[in-house]
Amino acid sequence: MLFADMDSTSGPALYPLHRCKTLHLVRHAQGHHNVAAEKNHDEYMSEDYFDAALTPLGWQQVDNLHKHVLACGLLKKIELVIVSPLMRTMQTAVGVFGGGDCTDGVDIHPLMSANAGDSDRSAISSLNCPPFISVELCRELLGVHPCDRRRSITQYQRLFPAIDFSPIENNEDVLWKADIREKNEEVIERGIKFLNWILTREEKEIAVVSHSGFLYRTLSAFGNDCHPSVKSEITNHFGNCELRSIVIVDRGMSGSNISTTNYPGKIPDGLDLPSDAVKEENARKLGQS
């Protein structure tokens, strides 16, 4: 059987390395809205959980994941952290990928100010950390639920001084609507737009801290050409503070990246034909003589 006739879900796939990026996807840790909604789903409609912060258990989950990314060496590899501009995602991002407690006498902006979001946490340092950038494309489903409505960027800048909010165009939340919930297909479209934007970035290893609904719906658009078990690995719902690493491939040359490891060979110039091509060339010359 020819390889071309094989089941496309069972064989390997090859892509140039410089067309690929590694994404480390993280769902935020447990928020107060998660606890309330487990008891009564209608609590998602409550203003009490506007831009919900992490629970004490959520911060324990953050600490555990921080220890993991340190122990496995992942923190040293990440070149950029992208985070949704909501309290629970930013608290998770800086706690997991930040530099720990701030040190006296070090004059740099902290990733998080002390007690941000009523957290009873010390300020978190930005020393020896990858850059953090906040992007609205990776927010949770928009509309109706107050827990998914953000504060003003001005407020967030005071609480998270070292996060770059410059990609966000509006100070106030103009995307969230009280009476319109974003449709699944709209979330998928937004998620693919987000991934295409990532492909234009120079960084190769990126952490993304986002939300269960956004991650699930975005990833559900992928994996249909894979074995069902691989599809399941891609699309399973995320637990609180779960980290899942994936590879994204730029098949459409959106980023047009240049390889830093490829080498052209044939230096200096000279005859460099495969052996079968040399044989054909010699036969051609003999035929002409």
Image: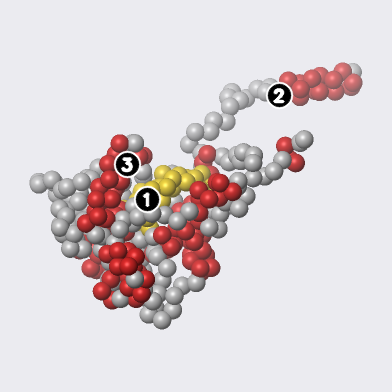
In whole angstroms, how far apart are the C-alphas of marks 2 and 3?
48 Å
Q: Nearer the viewer, residue 102 or 235?
A: 235
**Split into 4 quadrants, where in the image is the C terminus?**
top right
Is 71 rendered above or below residue 94? above
In whole angstroms, how far apart are the C-alphas of marks 2 and 1?
51 Å
- The residue labelled by disc 1 is 242
Q: Nearer the viewer, residue 158 or 178?
A: 178
Compared across the picture, whether 3 is left or right of 113 comes to right
Query: Residue 133, image x and y in percent?
Result: 33, 56
Q: Earlier in the sequence, mark 2 or mark 1?
A: 1
Q: Tell me, for residue 273, which label it has, or none.
A: 2
Q: Secondary structure at mark 2?
A: loop
Is 78 rendered above or below residue 239? above
Name of the residue lying farthest toward the front: 39
Query: Residue 87, image x and y in percent?
Result: 28, 63
Compared across the picture, whether 167 is left or right of 16 comes to left
**Amino acid type assigned to the residue bearing label 3 in the image:** Val
Q: Residues within 10 Å of mark 2 (few under 14, many from 20)?
A: few
- The residue labelled by disc 3 is 69
Is 273 rendered above or below residue 53? above
**Amino acid type assigned to the residue bearing label 2 in the image:** Leu
Compared across the picture, whether 186 is left or right of 120 comes to right
Residue drawn at the location 21% of the way across and 63% of the way down: 117
Query: Residue 75, image x and y in percent?
Result: 32, 41
Q: Nearer the viewer, mark 2 or mark 3?
A: 3
**Split into 4 quadrants, where in the image is the N terminus?**
top right
In whole angstroms, how far apart are the C-alphas of marks 1 and 3?
12 Å
Q: Earlier in the sequence, mark 1 or mark 3?
A: 3
Can the viewer see residue 149? no
